[in-house]
Image (cartoon, rainbow, N blue to C red):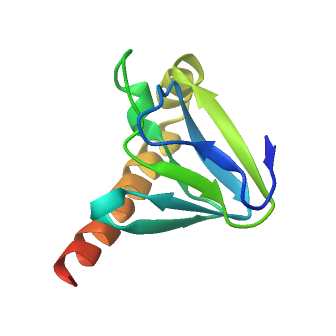
Amino acid sequence: MFVKQGEIIFKNGEPGDRLYGVVSGEVRLNWGDQGVEMIGAGSSFGVGALLGPDHRRFGTAVAICDSELLEMNREEFLFAMQELPMFSLEMMHDLEQHLQKLKEQMTDR
């Protein structure tokens, strides 16, 4: 999926059914009161959408520059988790980094 600079990928409150990986470019995630996070190549976002059938997005994602994203729905994600053990580890590592950044932003306030 190719997104142009300034394009909204998803908005806070919208239903979500897929996660995204950044192949190239950069995406800004605006978490409202919880801060802003920049996601670059090699990172993923939106994994919460795969955890439940009625998921609503908690933030807004906007392309900072022209970007190429990889999209995965729940079935593709579960297949990758089962068949590619390193994928699972990388996803957990990426999620931990996101949480750490948000924690640092919250304590800096």
Q: Give the percent coordinates (x, y) of residue 74.
A: 51, 21
What is the quadrant of the N terminus in the image?
A: top right
- Left or right: residue 33 versus residue 14 is left
What is the quadrant of the C terminus in the image?
A: bottom left
- Left or right: residue 54 versus residue 20 is left
Image point (30%, 67%), residue name: 102
Image point (38%, 15%), residue name: 53
Front residue of this view, candidates 58 and 77: 58
Q: Give the percent coordinates (x, y) of residue 68.
A: 78, 52
Image point (66%, 35%), residue name: 71
- Given the current orientation, which residue lies at the most extreme left position? 107
- Given the current orientation, which residue lies at the most extreme bottom position? 108
Front residue of this view, candidates 51 and 15: 15
Image point (43%, 56%), residue name: 94
Which quadrant holds residue 10?
Answer: top right
- Left or right: residue 36 versus residue 71 is left
19 lies above or below 23: above
Q: Give the percent coordinates (x, y) of residue 66.
A: 81, 61
- Left or right: residue 50 versus residue 65 is left
